[in-house]
Amino acid sequence: MSFSKIKFDKKIVLSFWIILIALIIAAPTLLPVFRLNLLGRYLSLSIVALGVDLIWGYTGLLSLGQGIFFALGGYCAAMYLQITSSSEFPNNIPEFFALYGVEKLPFFWEPFRSPVFTFFAIWIIPALVAGLIGFLVFRNRIKGVYFSILTQASLLVFFNFFNGQQKLINGTNGLKTDVTELFGQMVGSESMQRLFFWVTAILVIASWFFAKWVVKGRFGNILIGIRDDEPRVRFTGYNPVIFKTIIFSIAGGLAGISGALYTVQSGIVSPQFMTVPFSIEMVIWVAVGGRGTLLGAILGAVFINYAKSLVSEALPASWMFIQGGLFILVVTALPEGVLGWMQGDGPRNLLQRFGLKRKIETYPSLEVNNKEGNNE
Amino acid sequence: MELLLDSLFNGVAIGSVLLVAALGLAIVFGLMGVINLAHGELMMLGAYTTYVTQLIFKLPILKPFYNSYIIVSIFLAFIVSGVVGILLEKTIIRKLYGSPLETLLATWGVSLILQQFVRSVPLAYGTGLVISLLIGLFLPTTFSSKIKESINFKYFKFSSWVFAALTGVMTGSLISSSVSKLSRASARNVDVTAPSWMRGQVEIIGTAFPKTRLMIIVITLISVIAITLFLNQSAWGMRIRAVTQNRQMSDCLGISTEKVDIITFGIGSGLAGVAGVAVSLLGSVGPNVGGNYIVGCFMVVVLGGVGNLLGTVLASFGIGIMTDLIGAGRLLSIWPDMPLPLSNTINFFATTSMARVMIFALIVIFLQFKPTGLFPQKGRMVEN
């Protein structure tokens, strides 16, 4: 797979950024709150998509369990919000505990009274869990399809655990956040939702730069090396286990941030975040957008979710067909995704087919190989 | 003793559903390195086939044979899921050969489409579609070699598809006009009622066993024996084993790996259909019924290792017995006066969902010692 980048003019890049920032500032005033909230949610999903792109697009690890880390981040945020707004309930603990006759706060809730702890927990806890799962799996050189299946199984395990523990974290009902308070305001209120939109937009851009920094330079090269030929990387003297564990926990941390942002904007976190289909959907956002292109992951997440909400509003039954078709189509016909197709030879080939552009005489594959090595 | 027997039986019953479901998955995975995420949906098709067969056997003509419908439906389910699997192999999986992760995603797409298909298409016409696929795929292979080699073979092929489509539409409308329950699409779960001779319980050594569970164990036993015989005694079985061991070498020696792939995938999918019959006896049948079993099947494949039926058998019974031991809290009743912290832990895990948590943890610990499963393939493994 070649990732030849089109060299953009600096002016175009600058104007692109100005337009983007202007849109982000203007969106809260232009859009009605309902649509703004949806856009904010999709933007927060694009952060988890960035993580999927890092581990799948760059390192070749197809994780079907990113929902674990997404939900963990969401639960961390929701626990903090619930516990800080529970002063008027009996025993000073969140309301739902009374339903199950719990009088004492479970021990793991205690640290979430502190905002500082929560701030770090949202991304460190998912990253640690991801690192642990990743290390145990990678250590044994379990990879490829086995890795995907194990991540899916651990997703199911976490789902079962969270779904079954009513007395600890309200089980299948999940934790509501929209009626809790933050900075003296209702989290579900309009002004807070505007604030969250801005926070999300800034964090999306920040995590994009972070991801760019991660894949740049030697670290990124090793990741791509692992994707393309892991044994060779090992024989060259690198230990792929460490690199895979690090990138998997980075993706976990990104998923945690994404989950927290999604939770405060959708108003609830529940074990539904850990269902099998949701985690596989994350992969398809990246696949459609273009794996191995960071911008593709973001655009894919936003556009597919937007399309999903539009189609589901109009024709509820047809979305499953469309989604299923997308999976098949993107894998068989468009393996590099839309952005990868546009950056590669796609548009030129299309124009050639309709006779709008002259065919090039040389062998393009040879040229690509000479320029930047064979990435296949 | 009685308790232990009870636990063993329950474990074997849970394990045998897993086994018959995982058998097809394991064979296909061993041969092609393909994990079929649509396997659960092929099971679902098998379960729906049982339901459709049951309703058709209630028609006046077939009413006298009603009690035998479950036997017939085993074969029908095998054929239906097998045909859908072969279509899947011919259209999608063949193109993705050598890229297992892409296959994973594509088959997930197929599973979404199949789920929505049974929700929004009347089962009668679904049956018609399967019948036309069956005829369209297999009629051309029955032509004599003289016709196959002639230039006009594509016209023969085309006309057989036309014939297949017509037959499909006719059977579809015939079924939909005679069985009203099948003429409308519905997302609701349906129930398969076992024939009278399968209801009730049997007493063996003083313990009562439900007959449906015994039936499932029998189905599993027959499937495993049949598959073992097929793989070890028949010519195609030998070819399948050869390709599993070394694809390139088998190809060089003149085995048509393409045909082997189709046959294996068809059999694997067909076994999913048989598993669907077993599943339909246990509970109600809905579009999501396959999803409940699929991850368990994956665990069996991971635990059992690739390309070894014995591994699959041991892994599924192991998981089944462990599920029952942990999930029903039987350890407590076997050993009542164990120390308090231990019994508290066991109580904590004594639900079906928590048992899954425990078993997964055990599998991960097991894989730390044997990363390639119970019975790894022998020989020097060239990575990728």
Image: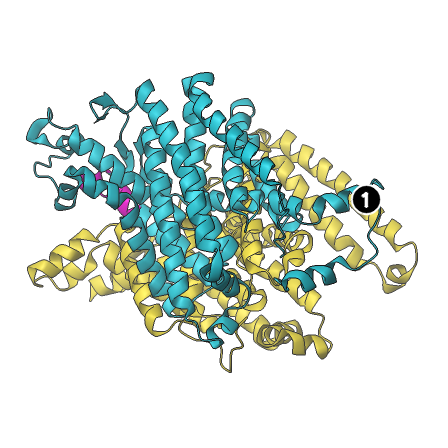
Chain colours: A cyan, B yellow
Q: Position of residue A95 (x, y in %)?
A: 16, 29
Residue at left 62%, top 42%? A8
In the picture, which quadrant includes the C terminus of chain A?
bottom right
What are the residue bounds of the magenta stretch?
A: A160-170
Amino acid type at circle 1 is Arg
User: Residue A168, can we see it?
Assistant: yes
Q: Tell which subunit mark 1 falls on.
A: A
Disc 1 is placed on an element classified as: helix
| In the depicted structure, whether residue B310 falls above or below residue A198 | below
Report crowding for label 1: few under 14, some 14 to 19, many 20 or more residues within 10 A (C-alpha): few
Q: Position of residue A364 (x, y in %)?
A: 75, 57
Residue at left 44%, top 57%? A149
Residue at left 8%, top 28%? A90
| In the depicted structure, whether residue B155 falls above or below residue A272 | below
Q: Position of residue A324 (x, y in %)?
A: 57, 41
Which image quadrant for residue B95?
bottom right
Which residue in the protein does label 1 denote? A353
| In the depicted structure, whether residue A261 falls above or below residue B327 | above
Side of B264 relative to A220 (left or right): right
Q: Position of residue A123 (x, y in %)?
A: 30, 46
